[in-house]
Image (cartoon, rainbow, N blue to C red):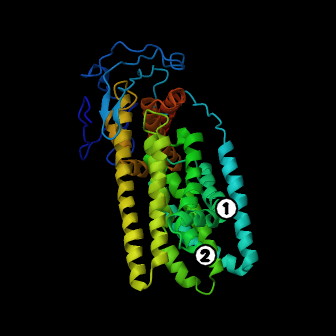
């Protein structure tokens, strides 16, 4: 993808300080005294000339301090991997009363209360189901064995949870929603699997493998079909009901991983509690050698829905989600079927390598690639605000780089926790702004995205101003 202006890389020793809508906050070399400098007039750059547009859009023209908004009607832009997208919407620059000033916060962005009905349903149903399952394990075995099993299951929970949080750094998902996703996997999905695995497995086995015994059929056919459907239903619910929080493939990875993590943890409790005599060997195999099994099977569904969120067709999930589901079922079925047919240690080692570690390495590479694609998407969408003066090219580069963002938070921390918090708010608002703009491109949540855009522009300007004020105050 090409742009009208090539990005300007910051030079070592650059002493330019952050300006209202200016250079990136937190640049490691920005120690010079703050001040105002004349910014380039981006609206006069080639390719940014005002054109005849759509006119005043509903919800924009009457926003305080924004004036009339003009939407330039340009030729579609080709974005690699996403096809032709509508040209950027060039918002007008803020009027003087709305422009960020050092040490001033002339407005406060109103906080809208977001309904949390889905989160409450996920937490309540998942929590009750998971609790009932653990209590049942205590009745079948003993309280002491269940306590040991729960403690052992915390190892993969913490290990995988840290990986998920690392992936979820661009735009952290709502924590309450993530808790609901975790409990859906560990409660509702486990309950569905417990009830249907032994029913669906033999029924499918009677058709595909008539000579297979019911227990093997439940493991080879029932578990993959039922468990991936139960986990996938939770991911799909989040996609359909919380579409604004499901902004792309990386979000799909996060939600799928959290649902799968909840399922894996509760299933580990079951295995550890029911096999207390050989719990050491089972712990090594499940928690240390193959802790990412359920993530491997669920990630294709999350990635598929993530790509569906980037399609202009709102019905794209109807064919992308089944593809992800079938891939997950195939991976799960291959793992369970191979373990059922294994006859020796060599077979088990080969199964672990080729059906667990290799797929995990491939999916890890896909996730890293998707994260880099997200950086490109954030950069492209934030660059839409350069012509109007809300951001500069240097800020775009800083906000679309994980390393530069981390350096910005480190720089802000020198002026106190409030400055670091404001910097984090500035960066998170920028990521959400980029995704809101991407939603305008796809057209899925257009009206909601326009309202979000106004609020997030205000939040960014306010946070930038707060950081600058705190930095100046620390130097006085």
- Give the side of residue 327 with respect to residue 7, left or right: right
- 132 relative to 257 in the view: left or right: right
Q: Residue furthest bottom?
A: 277
Q: Residue at x 50, y 50 (%)?
A: 416
How far across and down, in percent of the image, does residue 385 sit? 38, 29
- How far, Cα to Cα, is label 1 from label 2? 15 Å
Mark earlier in primary sequence (1, 2): 1
The mark total stands at 2
Q: Residue at x 43, y 80 (%)?
A: 348
Label for residue 228? none
User: Does residue 170 appear in the picture of this structure?
Assistant: no
Q: Quadrant of the C terminus?
A: top left
Disc 1 secondary structure class: helix
SS class of the residue under badge 2?
helix
Q: Whole-percent x and y of residue 428?
A: 48, 43
Q: Residue at x 59, y 51 (%)?
A: 234
Q: Nearer the viewer, residue 105 or 42?
A: 42
Whether pointer 1 and pointer 2 mark residues with C-beta atoms closer than 8 Å, the reply is: no
Mark 1, Cα crowd under 10 Å, few <14 / some 14-19 / many 20+, is: many
- Up the image or down, 55 lies above or below 290; here it is above
Q: Position of residue 274 (x, y in %)?
A: 65, 79
Can you name the residue that lies furthest to the right here?
139
Mark 1, residue position: 191
From the image, tell me which residue sits under label 2.
271
Q: Nearer the viewer, residue 352 or 182?
A: 352
Across and down, in percent, residue 391 comes to 38, 32
322, 241: nearer the viewer? 322
């Amino acid at each position: 993808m090409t742009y009208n202006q090539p990005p300007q890389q910051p030079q070592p020793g650059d002493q330019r300080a952050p300006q209202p809508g200016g250079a990136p906050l937190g640049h490691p070399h920005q120690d010079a005294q703050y001040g105002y400098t004349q910014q380039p007039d981006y609206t006069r750059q080639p390719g940014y000339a005002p054109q005849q547009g759509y006119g005043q859009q509903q919800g924009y023209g009457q926003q305080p301090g924004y004036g009339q908004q003009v939407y330039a009607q340009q030729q579609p832009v080709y974005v690699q991997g996403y096809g032709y997208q509508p040209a950027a919407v060039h918002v007008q620059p803020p009027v003087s009363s709305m422009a960020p000033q050092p040490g001033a916060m002339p407005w406060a962005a109103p906080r809208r209360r977001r309904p949390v009905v889905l989160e409450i349903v996920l937490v309540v149903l998942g929590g009750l189901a998971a609790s009932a399952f653990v209590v049942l394990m205590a009745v079948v075995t003993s309280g002491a064995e269940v306590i040991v099993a729960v403690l052992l299951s915390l190892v993969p929970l913490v290990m995988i949870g840290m990986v998920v949080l690392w992936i979820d750094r661009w735009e952290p998902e709502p924590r309450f929603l993530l808790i609901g996703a975790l409990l859906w996997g560990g409660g509702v999905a486990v309950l569905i699997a417990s009830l249907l695995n032994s029913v669906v497995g033999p029924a499918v086995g009677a058709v595909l493998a008539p000579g297979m015994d019911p227990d093997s059929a439940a493991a080879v056919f029932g578990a993959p079909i039922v468990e991936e459907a139960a986990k996938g239903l939770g991911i799909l619910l989040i996609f359909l009901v919380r579409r604004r929080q499901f902004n792309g493939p990386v979000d799909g990875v996060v939600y799928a991983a959290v649902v799968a993590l909840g399922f894996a943890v509760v299933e580990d409790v079951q295995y550890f509690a029911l096999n207390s005599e050989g719990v050491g060997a089972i712990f090594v195999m499940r928690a240390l050698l193959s802790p990412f099994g359920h993530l491997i099977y669920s990630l294709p569904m999350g990635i598929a829905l993530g790509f569906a969120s980037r399609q202009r067709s709102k019905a794209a999930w109807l064919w992308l989600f089944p593809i992800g589901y079938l891939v997950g079922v195939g991976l799960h079925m291959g793992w369970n079927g191979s373990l059922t047919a294994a006859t020796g240690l060599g077979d088990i080692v080969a199964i672990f390598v080729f059906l667990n570690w290799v797929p995990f390495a491939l999916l890890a590479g896909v996730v890293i690639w998707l994260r880099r694609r997200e950086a490109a998407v954030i950069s492209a969408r934030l660059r839409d605000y350069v012509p109007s003066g809300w951001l500069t090219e240097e800020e775009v580069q800083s906000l679309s780089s994980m390393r530069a963002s981390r350096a910005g938070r480190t720089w802000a921390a020198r002026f106190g926790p409030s400055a670091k918090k404001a910097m984090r708010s500035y960066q998170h608002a920028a990521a959400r702004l980029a995704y809101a703009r991407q939603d305008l491109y796809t057209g899925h949540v257009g009206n909601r995205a326009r309202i979000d855009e106004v609020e997030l522009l205000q939040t960014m300007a306010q946070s930038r101003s707060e950081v600058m004020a705190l930095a100046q105050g620390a130097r006085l």
